[in-house]
Image (cartoon, rainbow, N blue to C red):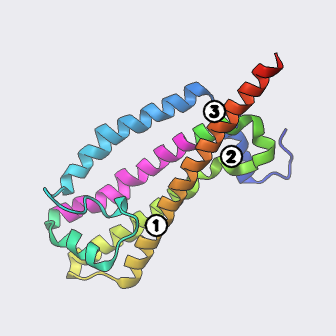
Amino acid sequence: MTSSKSGPLRRASQFFYTNSTLVTALLATAVFAGYTVLVLGGQGKAFAVANSTIKSLGTSLGFGQAEILAFFGERSAGQISAYITFNQVWDSLYGVIYGVMYVAWVSLLFKPYSQKVGILNLLPFGQVLFDWLENVGVSSLSSQYLADGTISSTTAQLASTSSSIKWAFALLVYGVILVGIVARIAGALKERSKS
């Protein structure tokens, strides 16, 4: 039952609790896996450098100016332009896809406890938000490097901090999913012992 005073977050949360089933969660996972392999992997080849220590700035837990300059320094202007497109389009869309997938799983696992945990099921969208902020920062750094060969220390710090927070959210989401699995197993065992 949704009250008239519930805000947009509560309504979104309730939407996912109501509509998340095992089928929708598995379908979201299949879309995520397909996109990762067929789209993201292919788009990443456009800026790949053989034997590079950094494949993409966003895959590390934070990064400093030295890593950023090393990443750009071993890539051509065309590869850096492809990296900008990757961050602005393909990786941003990836955030939506994995965000919906994780929200579907958290919603499914915590559906019986939705009144107690509230909008916990929307937690994965925090990861998406900081992924997008990282993408904006990295795209800005890439454009600046193409223009004059330098990078802004402030923008580098913003992108790095956003990346670190994104990964912290990722760990938190995995922890929540694990707790949800344990809670559902414990609930099932409890029901079985009653019968």
Q: Is residue 96 magenta?
A: yes
What percent of the width, then of the height, locates residue 122? Answer: 64, 50
Judged from the image, the secondary structure of the residue bearing numbered disc 1 is helix
Q: Main secondary structure of the magenta part?
A: helix
Q: Nearer the viewer, mark 1 or mark 2?
A: 1
Residue 167 point in image, percent of width and height: 47, 59
- Alpha carbon of mark 3 to alpha carbon of mark 1: how far? 29 Å
> Foreground: 190 or 52?
190
Give residue 129's mark.
Answer: none
**Residue 98 is covered by the magenta coloring:** yes
Tell me the amino acid under the disc marked 2.
Answer: Ala
Mark 3 belongs to which amino acid? Ser
* Badge 3 or badge 1: first in the primary sequence: 3
Q: Tell me the CA gap for discs 1 and 2.
A: 26 Å
Q: Which residue is mark 2?
A: 12
Image spot of residue 52 (x, y percent): 18, 61
Q: Is label 2 in a helix, a strand or a loop?
A: helix
Q: Which residue is mark 1?
A: 164
Image side of residue 62 versus residue 105, left or right: left
Identify which amino acid the numbered label 1 is placed on: Ser
Mark-to-mark CA distance, 3 and 2: 12 Å
Q: Which residue is mark 3?
A: 20
